[in-house]
Image (cartoon, helix red, strand yellow):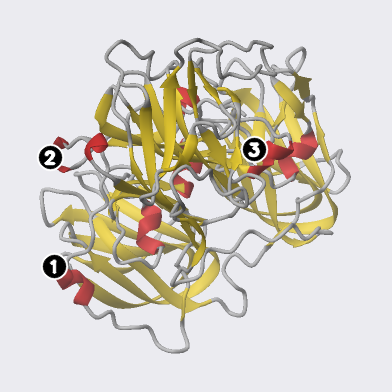
Amino acid sequence: MSSSRSPGRHRLGVLIVAAASLITSLLVIVPAAAADTLLSQGKPTTASSTEGIAFPASAAVDGDNGTRWSSAFSDPQWIQVDLGASATISQVVLNWENAYATAFQVQVSANGTTWTTVHQTTTATGGTQTLNVTGTGRHVRVNGTQRATQWGYSLWEFKVYGTTGGTDPGGDKLLSYGKPGVASTSQHDANCWECTPARAFDRDPASRWATATDSGWVDPGWIYVDLGATAQIKQVVLQWDPAYARSFQIQVSNDAANWTPIYQTTTGTGFKQTLTVSGSGRYVRMYGTQRATPYGYSLWEFQVYGTGGAPITPPPLPPDPAQPPRLVWSDEFNTAAGTKPDPAKWTADPGTGPNNELEYYTNHDNASMDGTGNLVLEARKQATPGSSCPTDPMTGSGTCQYTSARMNTGTKFTFTYGRVEARVKVPKGNGLWPAFWMMGADFLTGRPWPYNGEIDILEVLGKDVKTAYSTVHAPAYNGGGGVGSSYTLPGGADFSADFHVWAAEWNSKGIVYSLDGRTVFTIDKAQVEATRGPWIFDHPFYIILNLAVGGDWPGPPDASTPFPARMLVDYVRVYQ
């Protein structure tokens, strides 16, 4: 197996999510009346700005008082939540961080564009505010106009209570899943394999439709779906590839010949667009009239929601882990010295490494227990190159200068969501590259990287053992363009001096990375979809441990590199 595991060269900085203070955690939030329902939790949320990727808008509606949204340091700023359906709003609860609003309005809207104010103040004092309001709308916004500090606006929680008149928020059905699609042209070549219309309607964010290269990079370009019967269309979700439409219409038709626009824009932004619409028809079309790039039009997903039609029920999405989590898989590596990795849990992954690495991974020859509770992955410089290297089936060569260990749980254990952690001591030395990471399990059944997805939890370069990296890779952001961050230890300590616990908390909203219990980086699904491309991490993954030698990113070892070099793993655990 191989994949490019370089974290993003696009540095996002060291992002640390602050925990709520003791005083904040003890504040009592007055609940809404028993007849009303919390409507906002987990709903799509956007904001005028964020202080950084660690403070996304979605953190204000996640039900966690230890995560927050924080804005840029200017006036005005806003945050709004889409409840998914029109609701009667009775109460809004705001749990402010110290950076609160002195003056703000609470506003409601049917379309996310025209707003009605249901509460306003110029003398707010921060803390937790429980506001009894009266209003109707699908969207609810807090619009801050005057800050209380020199910082921005920041909310631990933004809760909206009310009733929906018997309609659950977001209760409209996905009508387009698995339905036939037709397009002006479609691409099918080495650059976009099977990028046919059906790929936009498969609810698979890693497959896409694209217009053909030979005749499709022209205006107009279009794609439509046959819903099977007349439907009331209420929402269209477009997840664009970088080849997106600047100007386009959403159109409906009963005969796929006569089309009526129900949405149009000349300022399309690409990435993910959630469009509230109103129209009736059996066919729904995206009709692009101006491309944003020299290329054609391309959509990862084209989803139509509403009532009627002849919907096919899609497979259920994976549930988030239960709380509190429980241990579901682990390896403590507590067997006798020299024992090989447990074959019931791990598979050796022999062969040459990717990324122009120099090592040959052996069949567990370089992996064993040390007898004191650790797995040892050992990189060795061969005294006689090729003396212990079997023939590489990829190259036909039996020579190599370095050997090392790579192992995975692919055919033994896969999982979707949870907390995965390992306690690791990394080696120091030029050219060394230890890693603890995960690959999408569909890689084992033929889906190529990066379409399967990759979640890197720990990467450290032996030439700079004061910096670690965590990154995710997907079709729209991979290799040097992956979404990730670097981070350090307090005081700039050396990672190779001791063991440290790297962990990833992974669920349907994103991934929170931590080091020794301290949050170091948060990847928010909604923000990635809105700014980088489709999120492809809602399916089974498996665990990988390896110690690479050389490669494009770390560079080669030299005379100062100590061999044998050892990566020690105290344990690997998965909680769900």
- Residue 54 drawn above or below residue 240: below
Residue 123's tag is: 1
Q: Label 2 belongs to which residue? A: 491
Q: What is the x, y in percent for residue 455?
A: 49, 41
Q: Residue at x 79, y 24 (%)?
A: 185
Q: Callout 1: few (<14), some (14-19), or many (20+) C-alpha neighbours within 10 Å? A: few
- In the rendered structure, the answer to whether residue 267 lies left or right of residue 31 reads right
The disc labelled 2 sits on which kind of residue? Gly
Q: What is the x, y in percent for residue 214?
A: 76, 12
Label 3 and label 2: CA atoms lie apart by 40 Å
View extreme (bottom): residue: 34
Q: Residue at x 32, y 65 (%)?
A: 157
Q: Quadrant of residue 84?
A: bottom right
Secondary structure under tag 2 reads helix
* Residue 141 visible here: no
Cβ atoms under marks 1 and 3 closer than 8 Å: no
Label 1 and label 2: CA atoms lie apart by 41 Å
Cβ atoms under marks 3 and 2 closer than 8 Å: no
Q: Residue at x 75, y 35 (%)?
A: 223
Q: Residue at x 17, y 65 (%)?
A: 21
Q: Callout 3: few (<14), some (14-19), or many (20+) C-alpha neighbours within 10 Å? A: many
Between 554 and 365, the residue placed more toward the observer is 365
Q: Label 3 belongs to which residue? A: 206
